[in-house]
Image (cartoon, rainbow, N blue to C red):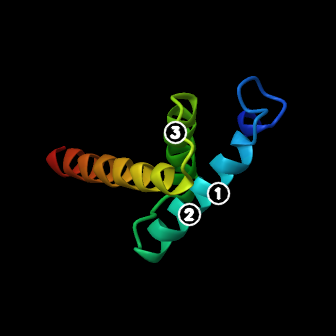
Amino acid sequence: MSTRFSNNSPGFGDGSALLAANAIQIALNFLERAGEIDDYTETCQFLADKIETMIRHGQRNRLVLANRAIAAFQRYRTARTIEQWLV
């Protein structure tokens, strides 16, 4: 996990690091079971970025965080696939 989720980081001293880690793990588990991960590192980075942004905007429900990050990743993956197909 990135150091940006450290509980010593500004804005993440309130348990948000654990919240982020839980939400990322939920999303990764789902995407892995669904066979939607082709680059694990890219997927982790994408999910971490989305979840961090949502936490900074006040979302505190780990299932909402995970589900929204999953949906965003699926949209991203579809757009990336279409873009590669057009090239």
Asked if residue 1 shows in the view, the reply is: no
Task: Tell me the residue at 66%/49% (across/down).
Answer: 19
On the image, numbered disc 3 is attached to which residue? 59
Vertical placement of 81 versus 48: above or below? below
Task: Tell me the residue at 33%/46% (across/down).
Answer: 76
On the image, numbered disc 1 is attached to which residue? 22
Within 10 Å of disc 2 (Cα), the crowding (few <14, some 14-19, many 20+) is some
Quick one: which residue is furthest to the left in this view?
A: 86
Q: CA distance from mark 3 to mark 1?
A: 14 Å
In front: label 3 or label 2: 3
Q: Secondary structure at mark 1?
A: helix
Mark 2 vs 1: CB contact within 8 A: yes
Vertical placement of 77 versus 38: above or below? above
Q: CA distance from mark 2 to mark 1?
A: 6 Å
The numbered disc on residue 26 is 2
- At label 1, the amino acid type is Asn
Sooner in the amino-acid sequence: mark 3 or mark 1: 1
Q: Secondary structure at mark 2?
A: helix
Mark 3 vs 1: CB contact within 8 A: no
Quarter placement of the C terminus: top left
The numbered disc on residue 73 is none
Left or right of 14, for residue 81 = left
Q: Position of residue 78 (x, y in %)?
A: 26, 53
- At label 2, the amino acid type is Ile
Quick one: which residue is furthest to the right in this view?
A: 8
Q: Position of residue 33 (x, y in %)?
A: 47, 76
In front: label 3 or label 1: 3
- Judging depth in this view, the residue of 59 and 41 nearest the camera is 59
Sooner in the amino-acid sequence: mark 3 or mark 2: 2
Q: CA distance from mark 3 to mark 2?
A: 16 Å
